[in-house]
Amino acid sequence: MTKQEFMEILNRELGDIPTEEKAQFLRYCTEMIEDRMEEGMTEEEAVGSREELDSLIRAFREENGFGRSGIRLSAEQMEQLKNLKEDMQQLRGDLIASAEGLRSSAENLRDSVTVENGRSDVELWSVSASQIRSLTVDVSEVRILFHEATDGQITLRYPVDPERLEIMKSLSTEGDMSLKIRAKEQSILFGAIRWKWMRSSRLEPLEAWVPKDFAGDVRLSNSNCSINVDHPGLPGKVDLTSSNAKIEFASDVSGAGEIVCRTSNARIAFANLQANKVNLRTSNARINGGSLTVSDTAELVTSNARIQLEKINAPEASLVTNNGTIALDHGDCRSLTLTTSNGSIHATLAGNIRDYGIESRTSNGDNDLPRSMPGGERTLKATTSNGSIRVKFEG
Amino acid sequence: MDAQLKRGMLETCVLAALSGQDSYGYQIVKEVSPHIEITESTLYPILRRLENSGALEAYSVEHQGRLRRYYRITDAGREQIREFLQSKETIFNVYRYIEERSQG
């Protein structure tokens, strides 16, 4: 056998081996033959017998896990192969199903989006509320207005500006409706300084309309722009998140499920809120409310500002701030915690003082309450420093 | 000889052949074959394994108008030899035990 023949056989027998792997092996074989010939062997001697070649091929295949061609698979290997095929079939089915789901979502999405007459800067997206499980709106630098819908639809009206805004809509087959709007960063070069900013002026607000009986969760969030709620309340959870801008309830809310509001450096204000559970949090700004009625818990937290409430009725409530006053005109709670520092606490509470188990503490201020008094069906904790505690009882 | 045992020995023999100086395939076979049975076809997978595990490195050198692949042992390869030698006493003890029990 000549070197040429040897190489041809090798090349053919390893036809199914990845190219780079095979090339490296052929280089090795060539080098061996040439080294042998350099030592004085004839070409035929250097190439060796066909048996040697076969053993070379076998060793290479076995070592690299390619198996020998023409070999029967064991029963165990057949079983593994069968399982693998079934898995592949299953995967293929899953992929087709999810592709169909995506296509139908995309079609729903396309059908539900319209353009308002004569407006190129806003778009309307409307879906029947019965198809929706949750609504998530996440926008930056855009005001949010939240209204009641009376047509059974969940509708979003939002600004469109391809140069300034990036819009992502999705509607999953499970009914999760989501809209995200990101402001694109604009920049301009002044000499060597690049000035970046995000233009938010004159953008239309995002408006969301949701029917009063929609039982799913609603999550609305933005940043640096206010959230205004003009909705009578939803039975599910409403989560409103902003930053550096106020959250305001423009109308009365009743029969609501859970209400969560979070912002910073701006106030939270409401007239009448009635819900199962309420959690209002801000910082460096007031929480200002009329009447708050809750069947579970109410938590109002801020800092460096006052909390002012006309009325609170809740099994369990806590009003927490610091460097600010807490003023409560009328409180009717089984458990009430009033905590501040460097500010006074003024409250008028339902019942007689004997109805309460009381713990109170201040420094550098008058205190109407006993420091510690056991008993009563209700509990009251009032804590401040550098401020007075003035609590009256109606009973 | 047991295949696993032989495999370990062959690998270490190849590393030992490279301890003194870098070498190439044909030279390694010539150097090692007087001590343990080795051919070009068995050497190739050993070199690949040792290269993949980082016990040796390969580089090409021009030789009489063609490229020849040289192998150089690494620190990891030297460590592998050290570990092999450390197991010598254990292996001898096992051999002695087998010998004694089988003769008794």
Image (tube, helix red, strand yellow):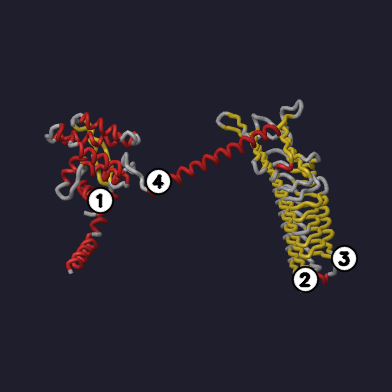
Marked residue nearer the N-terminal end (3 or 2)? 2
User: In the rendered image, which quarter contains the N terminus of chain A?
Assistant: top left
**For residue A340, what is the image quadrant?**
bottom right
- Residue type, mark 2 in image: Gly
Which disc number belongs to residue A357? 2
Per the model, the C-alpha gap separating discs 1 and 3 is 94 Å
Which of the pair A167/A28 is nearer the observer?
Answer: A28
Q: Report helix, strand or loop for mark 2.
A: strand
Residue A284 percent location from the top left of the image: 71, 51
Which amino acid type is shown beneath numbered disc 3? Answer: Glu
Is label 2 or label 4 in front?
4
Q: Is residue A353 left or right of residue A193?
A: right
Q: Is mark 1 on a helix, strand or loop?
A: helix
* Distance from the alpha carbon under mark 4 to that under mark 3: 85 Å
Callouts 4 and 3 close, C-beta under 8 Å: no
Up/down of A323 relative to A62, above or below: below
Numbered marks: total = 4
Q: Which chain carries label 2?
A: A
Q: Disc 4 versus disc 1: distance between alpha carbons?
A: 29 Å
Cα distance in 3D space between marks 3 and 2:
16 Å
Which residue corresponds to the image point at 13% horizontal and 34% vertical from the top-left?
A41
Q: What residue type is labelled 1?
A: Arg
Upstream in sequence: badge 4 or badge 3: 4
Instruction: Answer whether residue A133 is visible to the viewer in this image.
Output: yes
Residue position for label 3: A394
Q: Which mark is residue B7?
A: 1
